[in-house]
Image: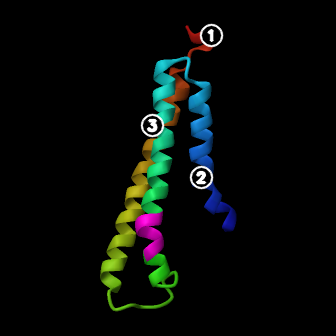
Amino acid sequence: MAILRLLWPAGLILNGLLAILARSQSAPFWFVFLAALCFALMLAIFYLWTQPANRVTQNWTTVPANREALRQQWECSRAANTAIAFAALCLATMSALSWRPNGS
């Protein structure tokens, strides 16, 4: 399970590297650059909203007084990250589909 924690940082790094490699072609570069930004945004959302709720509830093993507000915060942050992950997938796919061999 701990290895799954590396997926979003790996996605950010790999999409960033791919943006560097694709910089010679405008459309693929911007698509993959935006995909990398999606991963950065997902990490920010996780560390600003999801992780604090997990920490306060000890990964949902305790019930704090503000449980409902924390649950809402956690669910919204997870839903936002799901939508952003889908956008990153679409952007990376569009980058691959718009790539032209030899820059043509």
Distance between the Cα atoms at labels 1 and 2? 30 Å
Up/down of 102 relative to 52, above or below: above
Q: Quadrant of the C terminus?
A: top right
Q: Left or right: 9 with respect to 86? A: right
Up/down of 72 relative to 84, above or below: below
Going from N to C along the chain, the mark reached first, 1 or 3, is: 3
Q: Position of residue 27 (x, y in %)?
A: 46, 22
Question: Which amino acid is tagged 3?
Answer: Leu
Tag 1–tag 3 contact (CB < 8 Å)? no
Q: Which residue is mark 3?
A: 34
Q: Which residue is mark 1?
A: 102
Up/down of 47 relative to 18, above or below: below
Q: Position of residue 10 (x, y in %)?
A: 63, 49
Distance between the Cα atoms at labels 2 and 3? 15 Å
Going from N to C along the chain, the mark reached first, 1 or 2, is: 2
Question: Which amino acid is tagged 1?
Answer: Asn
Which class describes the residues within 10 Å of circle 1: few (<14), some (14-19), or many (20+)? few
Write down the region rendered in magenta. 47-52
Q: Which residue is mark 2?
A: 9
Question: For the point 50% across and 21% down, which residue is it?
Answer: 98
